[in-house]
Amino acid sequence: MSWSSQEARLAERPTGRPDASTWDITTVEVPDPEPGQFLVKVDLISLDPAMRGWLNDVRSYIPPVGVGEVMRAFTSGEVVASQHPDFAVGDAVSGVLGVREYALSDGKGVTKLDLDVAPAATWLGALGMPGMTAYFGLEDVGRAQPGETVLVSAAAGAVGSTVVQLAKAKGCRVIGVAGGPEKVAWLRELGCDEAIDRREGNLVRQVRRAAPDGVDVYFDNVGGELLDAALANLARGARIAICGAIASYNEESLPPGPSRYMSLLVFRATMQGFVVFDYEDRYPEAVAAIARLVDQGQFVATETTLVGGVAGFPEALLGLFDGVNTGKLLLQA
Amino acid sequence: MSWSSQEARLAERPTGRPDASTWDITTVEVPDPEPGQFLVKVDLISLDPAMRGWLNDVRSYIPPVGVGEVMRAFTSGEVVASQHPDFAVGDAVSGVLGVREYALSDGKGVTKLDLDVAPAATWLGALGMPGMTAYFGLEDVGRAQPGETVLVSAAAGAVGSTVVQLAKAKGCRVIGVAGGPEKVAWLRELGCDEAIDRREGNLVRQVRRAAPDGVDVYFDNVGGELLDAALANLARGARIAICGAIASYNEESLPPGPSRYMSLLVFRATMQGFVVFDYEDRYPEAVAAIARLVDQGQFVATETTLVGGVAGFPEALLGLFDGVNTGKLLLQA
């Protein structure tokens, strides 16, 4: 028997914003699993800003997706056939299985999900990579302490909304930045002490007003103008955790860097980049901490799930960069 | 009795490069010291890149020099009259006494110099602020370890030439960057394993060739294009110590920041600014360490001393930005 599976392959590397010519949506026949393998019916595909970087043929923290290869993606799904001793039909799993409907796996990098703890969508969000990123960026890189002021960009996104809630739970004063009045209103519901609409401009002034004593920790998901606005408003000894730069991921050339980086000297501050995969050994610590907050009602995991299947992936990815989501953005496979 | 003293006052704040209209060179009569005071005949005036920043009316790590005030400067000199219990006529001293020939002091911030350890010029260089800056930037901010690759910009200058020698003494592989073939040749004499002439351009490629396994510590005195070249060639876990940005100090507007700052993420690297005054409690540790290397013949203190007196200060300061000096740049008062 075989399984008909739609998949999204990288047809050609985009310059700037990906478009229709970037992707090749095609259907293949996936065979039954051989001994040591199992087959997953993918239910949810995770859309992550990092995906844009994976399309560039440059040296980075992970090799790029090759032209002709299935697009790399975190997914969740259900085992529908198995010749693997550790995975049984009906198991809920997550792993980097790609933008496809059916995936064969030997189990490497695939985790069984406990759906009693949280639904699969949350295992891709607050309890998945975005949650891990938020936790280690805030705790280890940002070293946020109770009472400190934490500024978070893309605060309505998957990572940002987790940072906001973790920082509030720690007793920090939290300033969230997002695009548009709806997201700003949502950030206030989420517990932000101050919420800034980046579309209103004047970011240096907006950050100064929200953080008159300066920013102790800036969790940076966007780069661009907001990074400069944060640099202009640091507290002494501030830490900037560089998690991403979504504002520039679709630029065709390197955008100007942060003009105000010499603020690092004036404020004796640190700017540090990190990659969540380095913390793999400590994921259980982060999952336990976030799950405990969920249990205590101090944390709300939020996801936006798009329909459209694998064929809807190209548009869904652009939606991510346009900020259509609140919380984690997912696509039903 | 009174003492006729030439002094350089800030006449107006420069935009861009300081020029004749920036300064007011004038002669005043300095009275004899009153009880609790002493009078210093200034012999040497230190020329430091930080001076340019002190002319800008902006919030920084130290208040700006006020219009009409004597220009702030580190100096060394000799006590020529005293009504202070701790300072006697004939004492050699250093302190922030300003660009002037004679200075009254109450002793605050003034240190007696032991000329048996080193001449006054060295107390303003390798054993003064530049030396302290080099030591704490390399040890505490850069956290250089034996065997690591250390890249140093403005390596022929006061701070840079000290960093080079301290790093070599630690057992690091040291790459120095300076402007022009004479300085590059001098850097090799100083012990640099590789020396780069920034005027030859292609800095990304030049740094890559000199550090094929990446840069572990970048001690940045200049900013600009070289900072980007360093970012492009980091080793994993690299540390960038932001000490200064002399390349842009005379710019009229903020220059573009480091475009490649996202390398901090790729290489899990840290960029940290520091101000030497924060390490004041530990200056004795640094002085002892550098003096010991001098004693052991592992360190050569180098100074370039200009003549021209206080009236020559405007030109001498521009010489600093044009890189006329090897090692510490001083002006005879």
Image (tube, coloured by chain):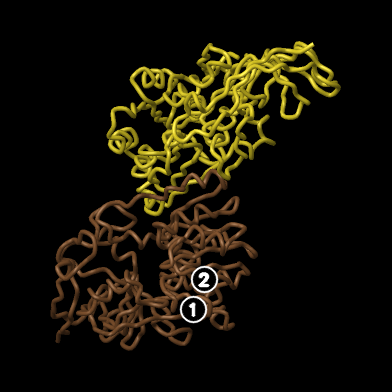
Chain colours: A brown, B yellow
First along the sequence among labels 1 and 2 = 1
**What residue lies at 64% left-to-right and 40% top-to-bottom?**
B278
Q: Position of residue A160 (x, y in %)?
A: 46, 69
Q: Are marks 1 and 2 on the same chain?
A: yes
Instruction: For residue A184, say whether it is visible.
Output: yes
Residue at left 31%, top 87%? Answer: A89
Percent position of residue A309, x then y: 24, 83
Q: Please, which chain is the residue tagged with disc 1 on?
A: A
Residue depicted at x 53% and y 34%: B13
Q: Amino acid at mark 1?
A: Ala
Does B62 appear above or below A133? above
Q: Secondary structure at mark 2?
A: strand
- Disc 1: which residue: A185
Q: Is residue A213 above or below residue B38?
A: below
Query: Which residue is pictured at 78% across the width and 26% down the height?
Result: B106
* The N terminus of chain A - image quarter: bottom left
Check disc 2 and report the residue beneath it.
A195
